[in-house]
Amino acid sequence: MKKLGTIRTVAILLGASLFAGCGQAALPTANPGAPAVSTPVSAPTVAPLATANQSTPTDSAPTVTPLATSTPKSSSTSSIPLTAGNCTLLTKDDVSKVLAQAVEEVRDPVHDGTLCEYQTKNLILDLAVVPKAPGETGVQYMQRVRASLGQSALDVPGLGDEAFYALLTSHATLRVRKGDSVYSFGLQYVSPADTLSLEDAQTKEKSLAELLLSRLP
C-alpha cells in the first residue's frame, strides 16, 4: 500500500508538472498576441510622413517673409534729398517779391520732385535741381553744358561755386552749381503778349538764385 501511495504521489506530481508546463507554454502564446495587435509600432511610421508632408507649406511661409522685408529697404532706397520736395526750396512769397507779381499757383508738372513751377499772371518760373548723368559730378555736368553752348554760355562771377546763363533767342536760363548740386532757373511768358526784357529776366533769375543759395545749409 505504501508503495502504491508513493506511485500515486509521483503520478500526481508528474501530472501537475505537465499541467504547469502546458500552462507556461500557453501564457507566452497568449501574451505575444497582445503586443502583436499593438499599433504604436506602425503609428510612428505614419506620423513622420504626415509631418514631412505638412512641413513644406510651413517652411515656405518664412521664405516669403524675408522677401517682403527686403522690398521696403530698396524702396527705402530714396536717395535724392535735394530733388524731393523741390517746391519747398523757395516759397510763393519769395518768388512773388522777386518777380514783383503775385504767384497764383505752385505745381510739380513732372510729379517726381525734380521741377517746380511758380506761375503769376504773366510769368512762369521753372526751378529745378538738375539731374546729372550716372556717375557724373556737378563740375563735369557744368563743363559738358558749357561745351555744348559754346559762345551762348555767359559766366556769372561770384554766384555759387560757378554759374552761367544759357543765352537763347527768347530767354536766358541760369545754371548755378553749389558743391555737387546744380540748380536751374528759367523764366518764360504765360502768353506771347507778355513782355520781359532779357536783361530783366537775367536780373530776376540771379536774385532768385542768391535767395535760394542763402537758404542752403
Image (tube, rainbow, N blue to C red):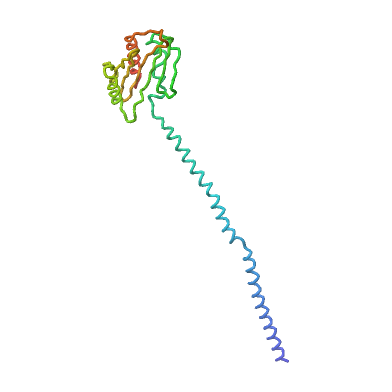
x, y percent for residue 216: 35, 20
* 154 lies above or below 36: above
The N terminus - image quarter: bottom right
* 210 lies above or below 27: above
Residue 81 appears in which quarter of the rendering?
Answer: top left
* 111 lies above or below 96: below
Residue drawn at 51 percent across, 47 percent down: 59
The C terminus - image quarter: top left
Front one among 166 and 161? 166
Instruction: Judge from the rendering whether residue 92 lies leftward or rightward of residue 154; answer left or right.
Output: right
Residue 32 appears in which quarter of the rendering?
Answer: bottom right
User: How many numbered discs?
Assistant: 0
Front one among 172 and 86? 172
x, y percent for residue 24: 64, 75
Front one among 75 and 47? 75
Residue drawn at 27 percent across, 19 percent down: 150
x, y percent for residue 167: 31, 15
Front one among 49 and 112? 112
Residue drawn at 37 percent across, 20 percent down: 128
* 46 lies above or below 93: below
x, y percent for residue 48: 55, 55
User: Do we see residue 213 in this rendering?
Assistant: yes
Residue drawn at 49 percent across, 41 percent down: 64
Q: Residue placed farthest to the right in the image?
A: 1
